[in-house]
Image (tube, rainbow, N blue to C red):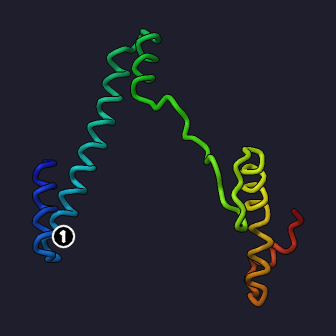
Amino acid sequence: MMSRRDYLLRKAVKSNVNTDWDEHKKCRYMVTKTIRNEKQAYCKQSVSDNVGDSKKIWKELHNILPRKASASPSSISVDGKVCINVNDIANSFNEHFTGIASKLVEDNNGMNSGIYKWIKSVSF
């Protein structure tokens, strides 16, 4: 199935015809769907094979699930300045997300939408 998807991609790139691209997209969708379904079936089977033995279930879960959390950014650019310190990065994100409502109100001052009136009435 994957080799067919790859073949259709090469064909679509070479011909640049919409029907070829549509056929490739359909095949790509089917490959993705099949992989997703097979992963789900594998996970269910792994757990059901080890029912009653919590040690084996946890071993399988550790094999299936990712072990590491995603890393936080090592630096960000705020108003032209690069922040490297972890606390500065956290404070920059905090200022951005806590001030976004008031910035929306300022940017849309002429709008009389109910949401903007509500945002203006709420004190942060």
Q: Position of residue 115 (x, y in %)?
A: 74, 75
Note whether 24 is above or below 71 in the view shown. below
Give the secondary structure at mark 1: helix
Q: Amino acid at mark 1?
A: Trp
Q: Which residue is mark 1?
A: 21
Q: 48 left or right of 6?
A: right
Q: Quadrant of residue 10?
A: bottom left
Residue drawn at (20%, 61%) of the image: 26
Note whether 24 is above or below 115 in the view shown. above
Total label count? 1
Nearest the eye: 84 or 115: 84
Q: Position of residue 20 (x, y in %)?
A: 13, 70
Q: Position of residue 103 (x, y in %)?
A: 77, 74
Mark 1 nearby-residue class (10 Å; few <14, some 14–19, many ≥20): some
Q: Residue furthest bottom?
A: 110
Q: Position of residue 31 (x, y in %)?
A: 22, 50
Note whether 88 is above or below 8 in the view shown. above
Nearest the eye: 95 or 25: 95
Residue drawn at (33%, 22%) of the image: 46
